[in-house]
Amino acid sequence: MMNLSVAEAFSAYENARARLPSCRPSRAPARNIRSLAEISDAFDVFLLDAFGVLNIGDEAIPGTPERVRDLQAAGKRVLVVSNAASVPRDTLLAKYRRLGYEFDATDVLTSRMATSANLGDAPEITWGVMGLPGVPMDDFGPIQWHLLQDDPDAYDRAGGFLLIGSGDWSDHRQNLLEASLNKWPRQVRVANPDIVAPREDGFSVEPGYFAHRIAQVTTTEPRFFGKPFMNIYDLVFAHLGPVDRSRVVMVGDSLHTDILGAKSAGIASVLIAGYGFLAGHDAGAAIAQSGIVPDFIAERP
Ligand SMILES: [Mg+2]
């Protein structure tokens, strides 16, 4: 699988800006804070990204389980808002519990759920699915689907495409998908708009990467579900019920998903600079270059 450097990952997001929500200008520069403890009084609801905020891979970010417990003990609502697409919510919840987090099951909201919530408008479609063999699909409801692998016919038989996970995706499969779409344009839905995910040895490419490539070389405009797009915030606000949005803050490590999404949804945001996407890099330069300005910058949650 291909890996990108942080500069390449950043460029990939910048090159995709035309397909991302536009960014509201900021009235003020970002304010540096030590941690979320410093702004606890200013907000009632904390929306936490997972990778880069709760965890890196299978390890909790040190101090974050305690921070989440403190916020919960102070009466704050703490939700997880993640572009996690390859597993159902229960699997994620069990993982967070192993890492030391206690969340109510309904307080975990994912791009997978945003995708599923919008599938009802195309009940007749047989979906060709980008995902690993054995990918659980039951929580998508009674849909028709088959996996896309190396058989060209599987692409031509699909009535639409669902991009869930790219763990074993290849250039060959991408070429089959693009060729099939160029023969017969069909809809493409992206259950994880992330272009990259930070790994130990660089950035892995995620379904969003391949979706933007489709947009460049076919006539298909993929539909994205998850941050930075509003559909996942629609789920968040439906779940929260009536709430003062000036008291809601999104916390994440990615300018182009977490922070851009928060600005698009009209809520405040905290960029985590010391973990995940920007770890070891100059957050100020990334903010200046992208023009995506969070309200706060914190080294750690
Ligand atoms: Mg993240």
Image (cartoon, helix red, strand yellow):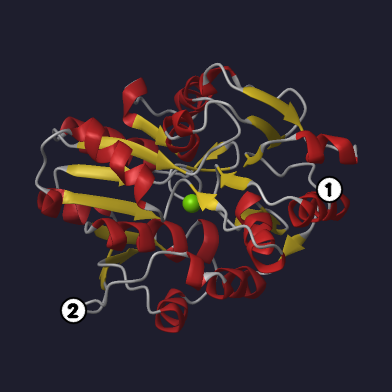
Give percent across and percent down for residue 48.
35, 44
Give percent across and percent down for residue 174.
79, 53
Residue located 29% across and 63% down the image: 263
- At label 2, counting other C-alpha atoms closer than 10 Å, the crowd grade (few under 14, some 14-19, many 20 or more) is few
Q: Which residue is mark 2?
A: 27
Distance from the alpha carbon under mark 1 to that under mark 2: 45 Å
Is disc 2 placed on a helix, strand or loop? loop
Tell me the kind of residue under disc 2.
Answer: Arg
Residue located 9% across and 46% down the image: 244
Q: Which residue is mark 1?
A: 173
Q: Is residue 189 among the parts visible in the rendering?
A: yes
Do callouts 1 and 2 mark residues in contact (Cβ within 8 Å)?
Answer: no
Tell me which corner region of the image, top left, top right, bottom left or bottom right, holds residue 288: bottom left
On screen, residue 20 above or below 50? below
Asked whether 13 or 44 is in front, the reply is 13
Find out if the beta carbon at label 2 lies less than 8 Å from the nearest ligand 1 atom: no
Give percent across and percent down for residue 278.
51, 66
Is disc 1 placed on a helix, strand or loop? helix
